[in-house]
C-alpha cells in the first residue's frame, strides 16, 4: 500500500495530479480524516506544504 499525506488545502490538486499521471483508469484514491496525531508530526506536514515549498524535503 502506498500513501500520500497532504492537507485539505492541497487535496484537490493532488487528486487531479494522481488521476492524470496514474496508469490505472480508476486509481484507488481515498481521503481519510485526521482526527488527531503527534502535534510535532502534524506541524511538520503543514510546514512541509507551506506555499512556495516543493514538499520534498523530508
Image (spheres, grey):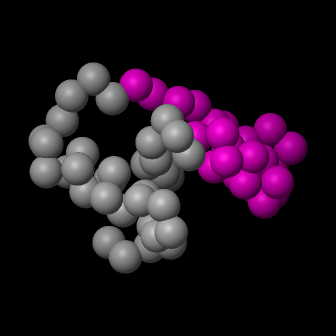
The part of the chain drawn in magenta is 11-33
Q: Is residue 5 magenta?
A: no
In terms of depth relative to the viewer, which is nearer, 42 or 53? 53
In this view, 31 is above or below 50: above
Q: Residue at x 13, y 42 (%)?
A: 38
Task: Return the x and y of residue 18 as percentages of the image width and height.
Answer: 71, 52
Q: Is residue 13 magenta?
A: yes
> Outermost residue, front direction?
51
In screen coordinates, is 29 left or right of 20? left
Total numbered circles = 0
In terms of depth relative to the viewer, which is nearer, 38 or 51? 51
In terms of depth relative to the viewer, which is nearer, 23 or 32? 32
In screen coordinates, is 40 left or right of 3? left
The image quadrant that residue 58 belongs to is bottom left
Q: Residue at x 43, y 58 (%)?
A: 49
Task: Return the x and y of residue 20 as percentages of the image width and height.
Answer: 82, 54
Amino acid at each position: 500500500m502506498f500513501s500520500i499525506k497532504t492537507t485539505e488545502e492541497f487535496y484537490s490538486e493532488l487528486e487531479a495530479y494522481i488521476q492524470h499521471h496514474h496508469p490505472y483508469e480508476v486509481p484507488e484514491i481515498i481521503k481519510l480524516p485526521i482526527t488527531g496525531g503527534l502535534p510535532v508530526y502534524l506541524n511538520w506536514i503543514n510546514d512541509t506544504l507551506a506555499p512556495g515549498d516543493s514538499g520534498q524535503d523530508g
